[in-house]
Image: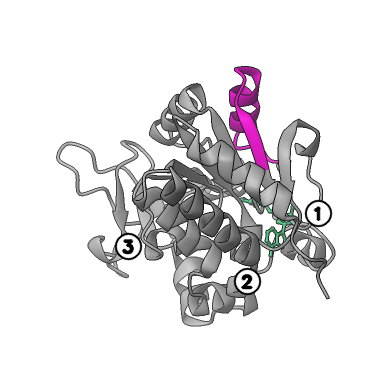
Amino acid sequence: MLPAPDTDAIDEAAALLVGAQHAVALTGAGISKESGIPTFRGKDGLWTVRGEPPLNQFQEFHRDPKAWWVRRLEQRANPDEFALSLSASEPNDAHYALAELESIGVLRHVITQNVDNLHRRAGQQSITEIHGNMRWMRCTDCHTRWPEDKVDVNLEDLPPRCPEPGCSGIVKGDGVMFGEPIPPDALERCYAEAAMADVFLLVGTSAVVYPAAMFPQLAHQRGASLIEIDPEPTALSELARVALRGPAGEMLPLLLRAVRERIERR
Ligand code: APR
């Protein structure tokens, strides 16, 4: 049985959000846990169970992009348990609550480390997918991105080439591989958001992976208030002004309700 939510903490977090000029959220695998997708670390995390993937994934891709594409198409045809959990997943109440906080003008931008596409499906408009999106493709030369159904993959002519005029770079899945630099446009937007943020929500991330974990710290150094939503402490807990210790699918709807009540009382 989870402990009762800390209503004072929820109220303090709501006050910070309602009073914010530019609130930003950084989300991680924990926000999708209640959608049936495992996290990476922690006792039943994917990397805990399987071990981390090789750090030279990107170099391996460039060594033989055709072989990578053949493996990708085989995996799509025979998905493993993790891939099945991704394709079967639906947005949960936490994703919808963040989208709602954006639509009522309280949350300005979401930086997500997740590739599961659930924020977009929940209706989030202003979003940076810093590790890419599993349903998208990207050119490794010009960094143009497309939803995967917009890219013509010809099995007789792998790897697919960029259709942008004058490019013809190799196209890969949009997901950022280990060893791959974060696409420049995504990095640029994250720095810009961290420079404007006066409130930063940290939702479902252990905050141990960079550069993602750097952005709330940059904002904090400028005086931003961090609000952490996670059942467990994280690497950034000591910087948090408020911690909502519980599952995001429970905490974010409570936070949204408290925000709405404050706005109605204004
Ligand atoms: N609600 C909120 N948070 C939760 C929940 C939940 N229901 N369940 C677990 N958590 C928290 C865990 O306590 C942990 O702090 O989610 C966090 C998940 O941490 P990680 O598994 O490390 O995931 P994440 O921080 O997203 O990892 C970052 O690492 O390997 C890379 O590319 C991968 O994007 C990923 C990055």
- Judging by the rendered image, the residue that carries numbered circle 2 is 34
Query: Can residue 64 be found in the magenta stretch?
Result: no
Q: How far from the left and from the top, in percent, is residue 133?
A: 44, 55
User: Label 2 is placed on what type of residue?
Assistant: Glu
Give 112 or 79, whichever is nearer the viewer.
112
Q: CA distance from mark 3 to mark 2?
A: 26 Å
Q: How far from the left and from the top, in percent, is residue 256?
A: 52, 56
User: Label 1 is placed on what type of residue?
Assistant: Glu
What's the magenta region?
Answer: 209-227
- Judging by the rendered image, the residue that carries numbered circle 1 is 232
Q: Kindly state the secondary structure of the residue where label 2 is placed.
A: helix
Mark closest to the chain's N terminus, 1 or 2: 2
Q: Where 235 sits versus 42, above or below?
A: above
Assign ligand 1 to one image quadrant: bottom right
Q: How far from the left and from the top, in percent, is residue 91?
A: 48, 69
Residue occupying image coordinates x 45% and y 32%: 22
- Judging by the rendered image, the residue that carries numbered circle 3 is 148
For the N terminus, the image quarter is bottom right
Tell me: 203 left or right of 171. Answer: right
Q: Residue extending furthest front?
A: 265
Q: CA distance from mark 1 to mark 2?
A: 15 Å
User: Label 3 is placed on what type of residue?
Assistant: Glu
